[in-house]
Image (cartoon, grey):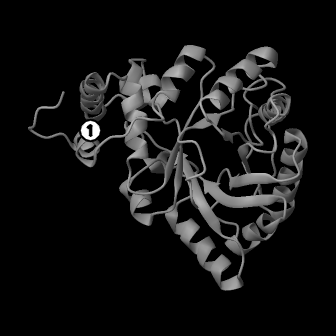
Amino acid sequence: MNFDHLFPLGYGAGSLGTALTGDAAIRHVALYLEAGGNVFDTAHVYACWQPGGVGASERELGHVLKQLGVLEKAVIVTKGGHPAFGTEYPRPAHFLAPEVLQQDITESCERLGVERIPIYLLHRDDGITPVVEILEPLQDARLGAIGVSNWSVERIAEANAVAAAQGRKGFALSQIQGSLATPSWPITADPTTRYLTPTEIAFGLPLMFYSATAGGYFAGKPARLYDTPENAARKERAEQLAEKYGATATQIALAWLRSLPLPTLPLFGTTDEAHLREILGAASLTLTPDEAHWLTEGDTSERA
């Protein structure tokens, strides 16, 4: 998938409809649009972690974009095919069954107020359902590009091989956790989630990254999941490089994701206007290959 027509940073809409509503939500989204933003990430499951929040993100996002007159132009990324999530989001065990995915697609279109979803992703993989069954509902004319979230490269390759053999649309992108700070937990701890490793880079499929700022780690916020000596060293180098560019370590970390040798698009989520402005400042920041390498690997050269 070609990301050239997309803004370098995507707006994570998980807080819309709950933490951000009404005029506050409109002002927040308008600020992103004024910077040239056009990518909005949401999901069928958002925001089920709030009482009564299921579907709130999609509904509020659609309302805000319509109010701002950009609903038909915005590149909306939404996701379906998620397992059960607490009492607020009951789901069948076979959550990737064609009839379940078809219902997810229909409900997302209705909530967003659109007839077509530009980018549609499968939120999780059960690792069991045959890919030929999963691909069937994704050929829906209401869907533009299709992709996956938190899938292994092995399952993606299997699905795309089947799609190619059958002349069907295959997966054009993958969304995983990705940041300059590598999470401290092993991928095997939760096989339904994935984070950036050299395997995904070598596979070459365009990547969108959630948790791209590592939960505020580069801004100095406590982040137990990233608290490792390796990440501490990366944070220190990001702070040094930030001084050179008159930027922040968070902006450097976002620029690093965009420097990877394949199409990438970091996503962000914030309800704070000052933080939003800081993040948007990273859109025009470009690192050299040497700087990007130094951030992760370090060397004996002085950087400032």
Q: Is residue 167 visible?
A: yes
Question: Taking 100 as reference, is 112 above or below it?
Answer: above
User: Which one is nearer the viewer's eye here, 67 or 161?
Assistant: 67
Residue 153 coordinates in the image, percent (x, y): 51, 64
Q: How many marks?
A: 1
Q: Nearer the viewer, residue 69 or 27?
A: 69
User: In the rendering, at what x and y percent does residue 115 appear?
Assistant: 88, 51
Three-letter code for the amino acid on which mark 1 is drawn: Leu
Residue drawn at x 48%, y 45% as measured from the top left: 189
Residue 9 x %, y %: 55, 38
Q: Residue at the location (37% across, 22% down)?
A: 248
Quadrant of the rendered image containing residue 261: bottom left
Residue holding disc 1: 295
Task: Say if residue 125 shows up in the picture.
Answer: no
From the viewer's perspective, tell me whether residue 73 is left or right of residue 304.
right
Q: Quadrant of the N terminus?
A: bottom right
Q: Residue furthest left?
A: 300
Left or right: where 282 falls relative to 249? right
Name the residue rendered at 74%, 15% in the picture. 24
